[in-house]
Image: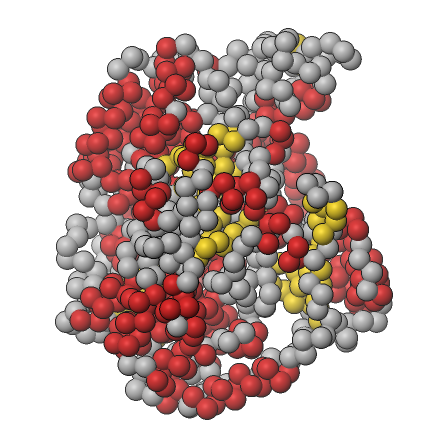
Amino acid sequence: MSNLDITYISQILTGYKSMKGALIPVLQEVQNHYTYIPEPAVDLIAEALNISPSEIYGVLTFYTQFYTQPEGKYTIKLCRGTACHVKGSKSILEAIERKLGIRVGETTKDDLFTLRIVACLGACAVAPVMMVNGDYYGELTLEKIEGIFDELQAKECKSAKT
Amino acid sequence: MKVKKEQKPMDKGKKLQSIEELESLQQQAFDRYDPLRKRVRICMTGCLAHGADKVRDALVEELENQGMSKDIDLVETGCFGFCAKAPVVAIDPEDIHYQRVKPEDAGEIVSETLGKGNIIDRLVYFDKKANKRLPYTQDIPFYKRQVKHVLRNCGRIDPKRIDHYLLNDGYKALAKVITSLSPEEVIEMIKKSGLRGRGGGGFRTGLKWEICRRAAGSPKYLICNADEGDPGAFMDRGLLEGDPHSVLEGMLIGAYALGARFGYVYVRAEYPIAIDHLKIALNELKSLGLLGDNILGKDFSFHLKLKEGAGAFVCGEETALMASIEGKRGMPRPRPPFPAHKGLWGKPTNINNVETFGNVPLIILNGSEEYTRLGTEKSKGTKIFALAGRVNNTGLVEIPMGTSLRDIIFDIGGGIPKGRTFKAVQLGGPSGGCIPGDHLDVPIDYDSLINLGAIMGSGGMVVMDSANCMIDVARFFLEFIQIESCGKCIPCRIGTKRMLEILVRITEGEGKEEDISLLKELAEGIKITALCGLGQTAPNPVLSTIRYFLDEYKEHIFEKRCPASVCVPLIKFEVNRELCKKCGICKKVCPVGAVSWEKKMPAVIDKNICIKCKTCIENCPAQAIQ
């Protein structure tokens, strides 16, 4: 973490100094850039927006979309909404956990995959559904899960070799 | 990939100074449109989960290769509604409906249908009842029973193009309001229409606007609640992705009526496409001067910003939503004072749901009286529902208020798949309830659903069949509430935790005799004492399942049995030899090879290998694994 380039944070902050209610948009922008909220960012934001760091931690731990650890290259967002639940998303979740050897909220050792669950992706008509980075995968089955992650892992192996 | 569009976008960068200039822009859109021109429409929202982008790319390539890209337009639309058949493609002007389209089909669609006018049978909807293929949208039962008013443009226009919206009477209602109606007259029209809040509560919109208009304080704020958090609901997503301008026009009319100078659209971050389309629409409005100061040269100014949520269900509650916009933790506060008097930054604020705003331009354009022709005595107009779960035709559905649940689930929805039987339909998400088969003929409106122990809610409709366990569903909702409770008040934070603990032990075979009465007692207490709507309604899924499925609770508690084979600790993972159809599907689907089966023999599960993943149970056509 020591070599983290924090200049970008100051850059973001210049645009928000006079805005009311800037904290959440600032955190969103910081996270978009770094994939998480690095610790030094909190102090910089606190100073720029004149809010205490504890208040910032209060906000960033309240909302499920803010992370305090770096994300893997791929973030898996498995939907655990009602429609997905009645169509077996719990079994899908267990299958992903088995496949990748991680639990919800964890990242694989190779920093490739982070597994998260979301309350609802709003793609209920194609349940059970998940998003991997920007891509939707619908009507999931245990078989499909195998295929999707085998393919992603193979792609990464290939790009690591070249 | 560059996509050929049907017309050049209109001249931008010039701010409209008058109503006449807006009308001339509408005329321009109209003049450029040729209704007889061939078009391919493809859903680029919900259908993306089934690879619609690859189908789009293939169509573009084929149009290019077959030399038709100049004569045929490709329109990227929002949701058609029929998500069960995704990806969906339509061909105009005939409105041919192709379903489950693959990239490999693109060549044939271009050469056969677009080139020669031939219909490709394998891509057409097949009506099993009538035993025939139905190639045209209007003939398919899923669409036939619907009345698409609010969703009229979804799946028809490119939501990223304001000229497409203008072509369909877009911003005509705004023009009418600004030129010929006073704010009071607008409020009167909304009151007369009987429009009630589509976010779930059903409060009368006109009255809400009137209260805020009369409230002292300045400036006033107008907020669109697009934090569609109910799991199992995607109506607002569909409307925002497919026709964002209709919602924004409703907001502009609302701002005019209330005298609101500033506004926000608060969208949940889980809807990236909706956010994208809203951003495009807002930029278009700003560049045309339809947002900002002195709109259309009149003494009417409205500044509208997009706020992205950060993943908290409770932010759908209006006071929590405002706290979130203010940059704080999204925690509700007691009401009164109501937002109309003391809202965002302490100023008078009016909050309506996405679909509510979507109704407003229709009321203004067609008149209140026309609007009241559809619906029941106390619930007017149409309602959008998100039909999901264990039903054949999942998707986005708009029906007149007063339609029965049976019509939606069995006619439009096409009934229950896999030969199973209907068990319940869940309405209103974590605040709602489960309605069993005996009550399916009740006409849907705000009041009838409350009588049944459910609520209209925002419109999520999740169908459950005989393979769903109602105690598991109740437990699911309380787990959800436990994750999403903001923790401010004790009844919600701890009361629902105690309820969840009881449900967990019931589903794990540790249920006690007194558990049902204890659940009811806790539920009643939480309903009365919780701070906000989230807590007050959190016990509803439990109460409604106790009301209608008491026997199932008893089977779990006294017989330690889960009749639907859902609760893992209560499943033996044994094959019932009498029910077993000896088909071998369980052997085929088992991921760990725990099932042995030979032709004409019942299957056997080796419990030493079995990981209890329930894949066999999910796939067994006879529900023989118990």
Q: Is residue B368 left or right of residue B577?
A: left
Q: Quadrant of the C terminus of chain B?
A: top right
Res. B364 image quadrant: bottom left
Percent x, y of residue B274? 49, 60
Q: Quadrant of the N terminus of chain B?
A: bottom right
Percent x, y of residue B501? 31, 23
Residue nearest the observer in this picture, B434 or B484: B434
In the image, residue B272 above or below residue B457:
below
Percent x, y of residue B437? 46, 32
Percent x, y of residue B517? 25, 20
Q: How many marks?
A: 0
Res. B305 image quadrant: bottom left
What's the image's color scheme? secondary structure
In the image, residue A23 above or below residue B133:
below
Q: Residue at x 14, y 71 (%)?
A: B216
Asked whether residue B478 is in view, the answer is no
Q: Residue at x 60, y 16 (%)?
A: B624
Asked whether residue B105 is in view, the answer is yes
Q: Residue at x 62, y 29 (%)?
A: B419
Q: Residue at x 43, y 32 (%)?
A: B438
